[in-house]
Image (spheres, rainbow, N blue to C red):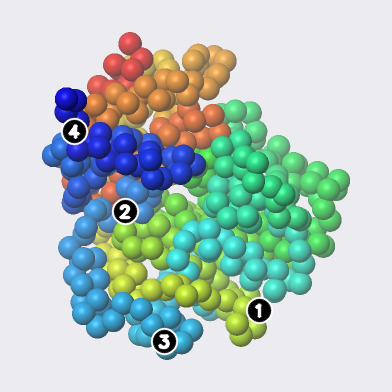
Amino acid sequence: MTVTSRTEDLLALRQSEIPRGVSLAHPVIAARAEGVKLWDVEGREYHDWVGGIGVLNVGHNHPAVVAAVQAQLANFSHTCFQVTAYEGYLRLAQRLNARFPGGAHAKTLFLTTGAEATENAIKIARAYTNRPAVISFTHSFHGRTLMGMTLTGKKAYYAQNFGPFAPDVYHAPFPYEYRGTSVQAAVEGLNELFRTTVDPSRVAAIILEPVLGEGGFLPAPTGFLRALRQVCDEHGLVFIADEIQSGVGRTGDFWAIEASGVQPDLLTFAKSIGGGLPISGVTGRAEIMDAPTVGGLGGTYAGNPLACAAGLAVLDLFEDGTLLAHARQVGQRLRAGFEALAQDCPRIGDVRGQGPMIALEFVKDRDTREPDPETATRVVEAARARGLLLLKAGMYASVIRVLVPLTVTEEELDEGLARLRAAVLAATA
């Protein structure tokens, strides 16, 4: 008789009951989690540097978030905001409007997923401009819905054979200095797109991640963001900042685009605003947000009361600036640790990111910069064996990205860095 573990039994159940298209980064079955730590069903402890792919900037099960959700649950869990409104939705919108970069009069729409936020931002921009076309960028990720997949500039993994895709979506180059695409080249690529493919008079919006998430943690240079703002102003385009992964303190500012001083017209968010509960949304200039008429926006679960309560608790944690200051310190410690590791490991070609949204790119040779996804995979596996959960990213899956909770302590961060160092050196020996 073969004796199997609970993990093996549950993974077998997953294989038999769940479609293969749903990926699994780690053969781990979670049992409980707190802060930066996660325990599986076998009782093994891990430091979680994935955070539900950027959902847990305030850590697993933050007591303030748990308490807020419990308090709301005692009152009601759902009414549908389009049927009867509730104060949590209104107060959360009010506070996010006050945080809109640039200080313009803003309004907020809540939804459930990041892809919904993307879809609705495009709807709003089209309604405002009465134009059809949208420009996205290479290496980008904007969701798995039809519009999300179409906008996404990382096709091989996500698009598969799901087409035909949404019309009137065009891709311009994203600046990727490490791989030869400068800001000047990216701007010229956009201008070439206007000259040869779509006239700017037909374009409703440009959508861009201020720091690419799935695309490998590439920050958009300030000069590029300013150039895009100028293009949008010149041609009457709506500038959409996709902050779904980069927002809510992930870069050391509440919104990543704040560091550039560039003001977007619309801003999409999701992931960490709910502290683990599903909520997303669009915040933007009031006159643009008001373009769709009654009935054009909404969703049954959009702005769920429990998620709004969690969102208010998350904002409370950022209120006095202490958490953002700690996040910047986390980013500094991560960068110092990564740069020291790169000195000892020639397979690390690039250390990059913005604040604690930071990554390592692995290459086969630093001179040729040929991507090395195999080494990145070995690092992920070696780290897991040492109790550290990591996730890959990038066009070539050769990047290790870090989404450690911003609430991590110095001791926990040092322990995680030690586990990462041991994993990298073992995987590249």
Q: Is residue 126 above or below residue 424?
A: below
Find disc 1 in the rendering and name its residue: 291
Given the image, on which type of amino acid does mark 4 rest?
Ser
Find disc 3 in the rendering and name its residue: 85
Residue at image x 71%, y 55%?
166
Picture coordinates of residue 122, whole percent (x, y)? 64, 64
| Separation of marks 2 and 1 at Cα, in angstroms | 33 Å
10 Å crowding of disc 1: few (<14), some (14-19), many (20+): some
Find disc 4 in the rendering and name its residue: 5
Find disc 2 in the rendering and name its residue: 56
| Separation of marks 1 and 3 at Cα, in angstroms | 21 Å
The answer to which of marks 3 and 2 sits earlier in the sequence is 2
Front residue of 213 and 332: 213
Residue at image x 35%, y 73%?
308
Residue at image x 35%, y 42%?
14
Residue at image x 13%, y 39%?
43
The answer to which of marks 4 and 2 sits earlier in the sequence is 4
